[in-house]
Amino acid sequence: MATSPPAAAPDASGSRHHAYSRKQKSLGLLCSNFLSLYNRDGVECIGLDDAANKLGVERRRIYDIVNVLESVGVLARKAKNQYNWKGFNGIPKALAALKEEGLRDNFGSSGGSGKMKFQVFDYDEDTNSNPDTGSQPEAPNSNASSKPDNRREKSLGLLTQNFVKLFICSNVDLISLDEAAKILLGDGHNSTVMRTKVRRLYDIANVLSSMQLIEKLFAKAKQTCSTIIIGLATMPLSFCIFSFIVVSL
DNA sequence: CATTCCCGCCAAAAT
DNA sequence: ATTTTGGCGGGAATG
């Protein structure tokens, strides 16, 4: 009780093999553990505290994973500290919805390699009675800009969905995170904003990779900018998912 | 050197 | 008020 053990213990005592490894603490590995821990039958409800405790990580990290998993339909928020386990079966439905949403939004149709513009605005399927005349791209707002809405806009979850839309709404199947950031960012890839966005993309890509929904490939070092390459997974499971969507539409 | 991305501070939403 | 949820960026591990 009292103070929860930081569990940091950089080294404690001179034990064998120190070497702090980032890979052991990576979101990808944590996600794998999370998955193997809850991807069993009988699991329906998941407590964040319980997860953090079982996985031996801080709360903060659980939020990251849970948010991206929810964006892909594996989880669903039920209440404070509680999520419902939907499993991988929830993925097809979620992706189909994202695809439809993405198509509805705005972008060029599939007819070759084209450039499309992405939109970062989104609203829930909730009963949001908002007297808004249609959707407006970029809302400069004369005055009193909507501050509270800005938060949701920058959420990991939304970024994840937009990132996924990038794949399923176009024939793009391979892009660098820098490229993705540029597209999803719309404009303003200036300075810090871009860097921060890319950091998040790394996080997302790592967890999606651990789910085999995406694959990380290495490119021959360029020189400046772009480095990582991400593409659609070649795994059978993913194939099923995407095939399902194609058939579904 | 450049790229990858973990850690955790600290502030918005909830309660 | 406390607690939960999570942006955001530094700066260390990694390539």
Image (cartoon, coloured by chain):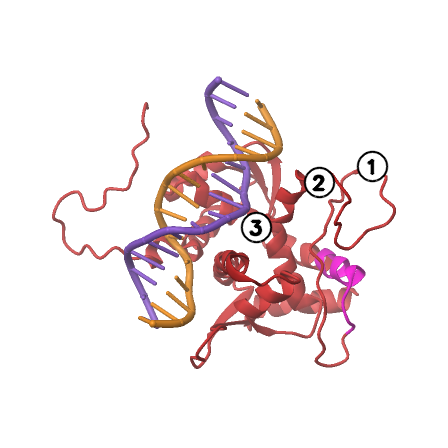
Chain colours: A red, B orange, C purple
Please report, as a chain letter, where disc 3 is located: A
Classify A61 as above or below A188.
Answer: above
- Residue A97 placement, left or right of A230: right
Q: Secondary structure at mark 2?
A: loop
Q: Nearer the viewer, mark 2 or mark 3?
A: 2
Residue in the picture at 77% in, 79% down: A111
Q: Chain of mark 2?
A: A
Rounded to the nearest whole Å, what is the CA distance between mark 3 and mark 1?
Answer: 25 Å
Q: How far is disc 1 from disc 2 in space, using C-alphas?
A: 16 Å
Q: Is residue A163 above or below residue A34?
A: below
Considering the whole magenta stretch, tell me its main secondary structure: helix
Q: Which residues are magenta?
A: A97-109
- From mark 2 to mark 3, how far is it between C-alphas? 19 Å
Nearer-the-camera pick, A40 or A15: A15
Picture residue at 57% right of the left edge, 50% below the top = A156
Q: Amino acid at mark 2?
A: Ser
Mark 3: amino acid: Leu
Residue A74 seen in render: no
Mark 3 sits on what residue?
Answer: A156
Q: Which residue is mark 1?
A: A129
Q: Secondary structure at mark 1?
A: loop
Q: Position of residue A34 (x, y in %)?
A: 45, 48
Q: Name the residue that disc number 2 marks.
A: A146
Does residue A108 sit above or below A63 in this rendering? Answer: below
Which quadrant, please, contains the C terminus of chain A? bottom right
Q: Nearer the viewer, mark 1 or mark 2?
A: 2
In the image, residue A232 sits, relative to residue A136, either above or below, namely: below
Rendering coords of residue A242 (x, y %): 67, 67
Assess whether residue A100 is covered by the magenta stretch: yes
Three-letter code for the amino acid on which mark 1 is drawn? Ser
- What's the residue at 50%, 56% (across, down)? A196
> In the drawing, does residue A10 fall left or right of residue A104?
left
